Image (cartoon, rainbow, N blue to C red):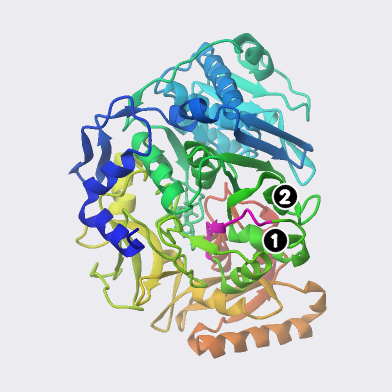
Amino acid sequence: MPGYADFYRRSIDDRDGFWAEQAALIDWQTPPQQVCDYSTPPFARWFVGGTTNLCHNAVDRHLPTRADQAALIAVSTETNTEQVYTFAQLHTEVQCMAAALRALGVNKGDRVLIYMPMVAEAAFAMLACARIGAIHSVVFGGFAAGSLASRIEDATPTVVVSADAGSRGGKVVAYKPLLDEAIAISTHKPAAVLLVDRQLVAMNLVAGRDYLWGALRQNHLQTVVPCEWVDATHPSYTLYTSGTTGRPKGVQRDTGGYAVALAASMQHIYGGKAGETYFSTSDIGWVVGHSYIVYGPLIAGMATIMYEGLPTRPDGGIWWSLVEKYKVTVMFSAPTAVRVLKKQDSAWLSRYDLSSLRALFLAGEPLDEPTAQWISQALGKPIIDNYWQTETGWPILSIANGVEQAPSKFGSPGVAMYGYNVKLLDENTGEELLGADQKGVVAIEGPLPPGCMQTVWKDDARFVKTYWSSIPGKLVYNTFDWGVRDKDGYFFILGRTDDVINVAGHRLGTREIEESISSHPNVSEVAVVGVADALKGQVAMAFVVAKDASSLIDDATKLKLEGEIMKVVDHSIGAVGRPARVRFVTVLPKTRSGKLLRRAIQAVCEGRDPGDLTTMEDPSALQQIRDLISS
Ligand code: ATP
Ligand code: MG
């Protein structure tokens, strides 16, 4: 087998030949006539002329060979339930859901908004939409009525699929009242609402609009709903970005390119095989949930675990007990979850038989070296950081573990993945930085490979303007991340381009300073932002969650730790990186997907309006910072 370097080169030099081969990993009703149409850049159309179906590839295709094997394993430590659906059972449930959606008026091309907790029915609904060619738009369960309303207006769904409630850490969150309120505020009214009754809270049904899944399911248990063959370029779904840097963007994804990209990534990056089990701890509200809880593993013929609950309840061993029980071979999580586990006893990770597990993939935000070291030692397995975006749908940077088991480097999410012509560019001149260890904007030369966003939903102009117009004189896709590449081709992400601090003419990524601060033994989490300063242009401000908060009893102990942290930064980066202040908080403001909301912290520090906070997890976190700043 050729090494990864050759594999990658070919994907760029012989783009169409490479992807034509990958296209054979999925089933087509009509094979594509053209691999890539890039005649109207930056809009790429992949596998033109081909017709296929995502649900067919995820479910029906496996019936002849693995009907009785596990497909979907739904585990909830919130309701203490665990149910395994075989591919045959999944096929039945998805057909029922598809029949129910059709009965409620959903046709090909119509939108269905899914506002659901992490229950099996959420996956049934996604797959059912794909089956009938409807476009799903999953909104993170539990989002407030206002955010939900704006997404209802944007997607104009025919039907909303929801549930009575979700549950988190034993706390029930009623969804139905939030949904009712959202529909009341929204100018668009869905024709029907399909509700899964988990019997967690009572629901008031609106006559003529609200239907119970339980009842419709009974009606349709025998209904056959064949897969609707759609063009490769038919939109499969829309999904919002996390809203870390501003108003979330509605990403629109195709069908054929996405199916091929996922099938290829399961083989080349994750190295997952049919009949094995994949466990992604993400949520279906995020892109990781779409690609690697629902579609990717199922397309590969793997069983997928859908987990509702915390990583620490009933105890810190829960995920690892699932790895043992279901012989998980590939696991996918986020650094934020690992940092939660890190606060527990690492003995939880050695209590279970993890021999089936080949690798743990982490993505979503920078993986700091202490966290990477900790999990790597505790698990004794390869830890693979991978870097991507809602927009791309699958990794831009990673280790292609299925092609060549190259070593990881701590702090690096790896090398450019096949299909991505990744460049580092000078932000101001657009000039390509070819040498090692130069800092620049991470950009991708078009066309984006299969599986990436087609456009911004209903807004082609925003797609071009947001992503393709920011580098002077060049039509390239801007990731808005700031990075550096070493001599071996490994990238290091230094933070968002927005998060670059300019201290007296020195450009520093907030990530570099955070990385340095987190090496102090009493630092659990840290956020660094640049704050306008009359003298220096900008100064760094650090907000730290101490590991041992009980040691910070008064101003003197805080000042002492602040001084120690500054010394650490002086030592590793130099005085230019030294924060003007290090302040202590008990929790940092994050999105629901666990990303630091640096721009909100920065705005508060500069006395500005923090902007769109609809995806924020815990508003009290920002309040702590407000209180500190005004004190
Ligand atoms: P928005 O675009 O709405 O501001 P967002 O960028 O956080 O939100 P996502 O698409 O969920 O939305 O996240 C993608 C971003 O997450 C990347 O652009 C990068 O900044 C960060 N990221 C993802 N994976 C990694 C990683 N492995 N290392 C460092 N950063 C990562
Ligand atoms: Mg983004």
Q: Which residue is labeled 2 in the image?
A: 310
Residue type (three-letter) at the residue carrying disc 1:
Val
Position of residue 405 relative to residue 23, above or below, is below
Along the viewing direction, whichever of 39 and 481 lies nearer the viewer: 39
Location of residue 608 in the rendering, given as x and y in whole percent from the top left corner: 53, 62
Task: Please rate how many residues cluster around mark 2, counting C-alpha atoms within 10 Å: few if below 14, some from 14 to 19, many from 20.
Answer: many
| Residue hosting label 1 | 340
Q: Do the residues labelled 2 and 1 touch (CB within 8 Å)?
A: yes
Q: How crowded is mark 1: few (under 14 residues within 10 Å), some or many (20 or more)?
A: some
| Residue 359 falls inside the magenta stretch | yes
What secondary structure is found at the residue carrying circle 1? Answer: helix
Residue at mark 2 to residue at mark 1: CA–CA distance: 10 Å
Which image quarter: residue 567? bottom right
Point 51% across, 55% down: residue = 244
Q: Is residue 430 left or right of residue 297?
A: left
Amino acid at pointer 2 = Leu
Q: Answer yes or no: is residue 506 visible.
A: yes
Magenta segment includes 357: yes
Quarter of the picture containing the N terminus is bottom left
How far across and how far down the image is residue 431, in percent? Answer: 23, 70
Q: Does dot 2 land on a helix, a strand or a loop?
A: loop
Of labels 2 and 1, earlier in sequence is 2
Magenta range = 354-366
